[in-house]
Each structure stands twice: as C-alpha cells, then as structure tokens.
C-alpha cells in the first residue's frame, strides 16, 4: 500500500467512526487552543501593562522603598509594606538633587468612604505633593490645586476626581463645600479633568489631598510608598538617577559596600523589569497549558491501542496478503498524525478566534490592549500537534506491526 492509499484508508476509517475520531481529537484541540490563547492573551496583557507605563512619559524616574535586583522589582511593588522612604527624602532630593530634576511628588494612598450630608461614596484617596500636576502632566477642570505651604501645614483640602465629584454633587458646584474622609472634614478646592484609566487605576474615581495630611490624619504613618521624579529631558535620565541614588544613600547613611534600601529606576529600566516579569509569567502559563497536550496525547494513544485491538483481523489479513511490519507501522502512524494535525488546526482556529474576541472586548472597554498573535505560536501549534501524533502513535503502531498474521486471522 503506497502513501496515497494510506491517507485514503485513514480518511475512510475516520469518516466511519466520526464520534470516536472527534473524542480522540478533543484533548489535542483543547491543548493547542489553550497554548494559542495563553500566548496571545499573555502578549496582549503584556502590551497593556507596558502601554500604561509608556503613556506616563519617558522622562520619569520612580523611587520605591526596598532593595531590588537589577532585573527585578522591589518587594514593595508586590504589595509588601516597606517603610524605608520618608517625606524628608523628598525634601532632600529637592534641595540636593541635580538641576536636571524639574519636579517630584511623593505618594501614599488608602481607601475609605467620603461623606457629604450622609451621601456616601467609597473611593481611593491619594496623598500627593503640591507639584503633582507637573509630574503627572495633567490639569484641573476647575478650582485650584493645593500649595506647597498647604502641603507642609497639613491643610485639610481636597481635589476631587471627575467621577467622585459627579457622585457627590451631580450638577451642583462643589468648590468650597465640605466633605468628610474618615472623621476629618475637608474643603473642596478643585476638581480634576477627566483622565480615564492609567496604571490600572481609574484616575477619575479618587480624590487628592496633601501627602502630609494623608500620612498624619488619614493613615497614621510616617513613610511614603513612592516618589515620582520628572526630569527636564530624556537625555538626562541617567544623570538624574545617579543623583537621586547619591542623595538617598547619604540620607539613609548607607555605606559604600552596603545594599540600598530603596530602588531608583528610570521609566526605561522599569519597562525592562516589567517585560522580564511578564515574559516569565507568560511562558510559565504556556507550560501549564501545554500539560493538556500531554493528556491529549495519552488519550490518542489509548484510542489507537483500542483500535489495534478492534482491527486485529484486518491487520492479520493485510499481513497474509504480503504487508510488511513497516507498512503496518506507517499506516497507524499516518492515522494518528492526521488526527492530531486536524485537531491542531481546529485548536489554532479556535484559539485565534477567542484571542481576537478578548482583545476586542478589552479595547472596547478602553484598555490599550494590542492584538498580538505571533506566527511562532501558530507554527508551534502545527509542529506540536504533528509531533504528538508521531510520539504517541509509535506504541500502537509497533504493537500492530508485531501481531502474528495467523493468530490475528483467528481473532474473534
């Protein structure tokens, strides 16, 4: 039997046993589909994270508490509370940092309920510096931002995000009105323009107060969670990072050979670290989803072993008519490879379709989600599906080829 006859015979067998063929394919379809989805959705999620960071600008430096390896984030980025950064560090950078630093802001945050005459709104309050607008390159819709003097004097003033203003005041003028955060009364002095989602946070659904006020009156802490620094040009980023590290090492009395208790990175370095983290996570998820392919491979092997048992007389007849062991092996290998190839194609098509739907939904919701389906993932799906057919088809094919022709003909 030549190769063409083998393929024709395989087609006839699969057409005759449609249900069994479908169930045989199912494990591979799910496995390939999972790999394609994870790679495409993982790449899309990675692009979302990086686009969010890049949208902040290339001339920013972030300083976080806690030591970090060169290619990894500090523990504080993973939610661990570290208290090594203080408000005095911000002041020290302002005074002793290089002239290329334009402005900087400290950050702390918390969640609580705002109260306006028993109208309650649950939101995030952010303690920031008076230079917040310059650092974030944003603006007010109305009113004013608090001053540096108000920041240092623990002023009880607040700027509302657009959504918070609407929930509390509707169409009424909010300026000059009093609201309560925790047990403290704050005067509304401004409202922010609409900003949407940035860094996975709805910027319109939060309020802003002086960082010292947030520390002392709302949170009861003496540390800050982040310093964001704006540099006058991207060319001076490395100079500014070196300057900030030198100031903070002096401020924290860190010796020459001692490890830093903070992490100062440019936006480019932050993007590189995020890329490394998301790549590792993406390929870990691909490896987990690939386990479904192994399970599907064993399923195919079991089905083909059962097929060998069912077709014992057929194999005996073929051997009696002169078929060699190699012909029998080739027939069963072709069957399993055809099954896994078509299963792989179906899995690829379904995986790409679902990835497109996920990307469109994310884009519809306003996220900067790129649809990224790499040719490598499609090629990988094809190669893996055929390889599984080859690997898991060998045992049934070998078993079929070793059947004795006379005993096979007597098999009932």
Image (cartoon, rainbow, N blue to C red):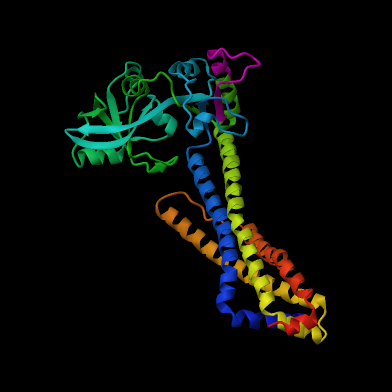
Residue 122 as seen in the image, left or right of residue 262 = left
Whether residue 6 is situated above or below residue 265 in the rendered picture: below
For the C terminus, the image quarter is bottom right
Residue 236: x %, y % from top left = 58, 28
Q: Does 251 appear in magenta?
A: yes
Determine if residue 31 is in view: yes
Q: Does 397 appear in magenta?
A: no
Residue 99: x %, y % from top left = 53, 20
- Residue at image location 77% in from the left, 81% down from the top: 407
Determine if residue 4 is in view: no
- Residue at image location 65% in from the left, 64% down from the top: 385
For the N terminus, the image quarter is bottom right
Q: Quadrant of residue 348?
A: bottom right
Whether residue 9 is situated above or below residue 360 in the rendered picture: below
Q: Nearer the viewer, residue 328 or 153?
A: 328
So how many labels did they put on this image? Answer: 0
Q: What stretch is highlighted in magenta?
A: 246-265
- Residue at image location 29% in from the left, 20% down from the top: 155
Q: In which quarter of the image is residue 238?
A: top right
């Amino acid at each position: 039997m030549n190769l063409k006859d083998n393929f024709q015979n395989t087609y006839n067998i699969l057409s005759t046993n449609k249900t069994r063929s479908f169930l045989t394919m199912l494990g591979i379809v799910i496995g390939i589909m999972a790999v394609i989805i994870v790679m495409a959705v993982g790449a899309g999620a990675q692009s979302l994270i990086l686009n969010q960071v890049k949208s902040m600008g290339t001339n920013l430096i972030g300083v976080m508490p806690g030591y970090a390896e060169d290619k990894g984030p500090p523990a504080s980025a993973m939610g661990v509370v570290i208290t090594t950064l203080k408000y005095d560090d911000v002041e020290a950078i302002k005074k002793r940092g290089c002239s290329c630093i334009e402005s900087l802001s400290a950050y702390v945050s918390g969640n609580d309920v705002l109260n306006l005459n028993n109208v309650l709104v649950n939101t995030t309050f952010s303690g920031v510096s008076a230079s917040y607008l310059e650092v974030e390159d944003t603006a007010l819709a109305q009113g004013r931002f608090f001053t540096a003097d108000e920041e240092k004097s623990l002023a009880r003033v607040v700027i509302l995000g657009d959504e918070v203003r609407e929930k509390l005041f509707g169409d009424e003028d909010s300026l000059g009105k009093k609201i309560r955060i925790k047990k403290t009364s704050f005067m509304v002095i401004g409202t922010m323009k609409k900003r949407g989602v940035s860094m996975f946070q709805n910027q319109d659904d939060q309020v802003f107060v002086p960082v010292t006020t947030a520390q002392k009156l709302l949170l009861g802490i003496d540390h800050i969670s982040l310093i964001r620094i704006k540099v006058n040009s991207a060319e001076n980023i490395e100079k500014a990072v070196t300057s900030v590290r030198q100031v903070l090492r002096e401020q924290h009395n860190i010796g020459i050979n001692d490890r830093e208790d903070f992490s100062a990175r440019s936006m480019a370095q932050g993007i590189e670290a995020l890329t490394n983290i998301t790549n590792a996570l993406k390929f870990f998820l691909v490896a987990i989803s690939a386990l479904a392919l192994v399970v599907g491979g064993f399923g195919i092997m079991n089905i083909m072993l059962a097929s060998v048992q069912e077709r014992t007389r057929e194999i005996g007849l073929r051997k009696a008519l002169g078929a060699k062991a190699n012909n029998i092996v080739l027939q069963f290998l072709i069957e399993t490879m055809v099954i896994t190839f078509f299963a792989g194609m179906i899995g690829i098509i379904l995986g790409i379709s679902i990835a497109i739907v996920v990307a469109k939904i994310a884009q519809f919701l306003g996220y900067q989600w790129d649809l990224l389906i790499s040719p490598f993932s499609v090629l990988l799906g094809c190669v893996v599906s055929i390889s599984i057919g080859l690997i898991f088809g060998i045992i049934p094919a070998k078993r079929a080829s070793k059947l004795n022709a006379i005993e096979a003909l007597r098999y009932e």
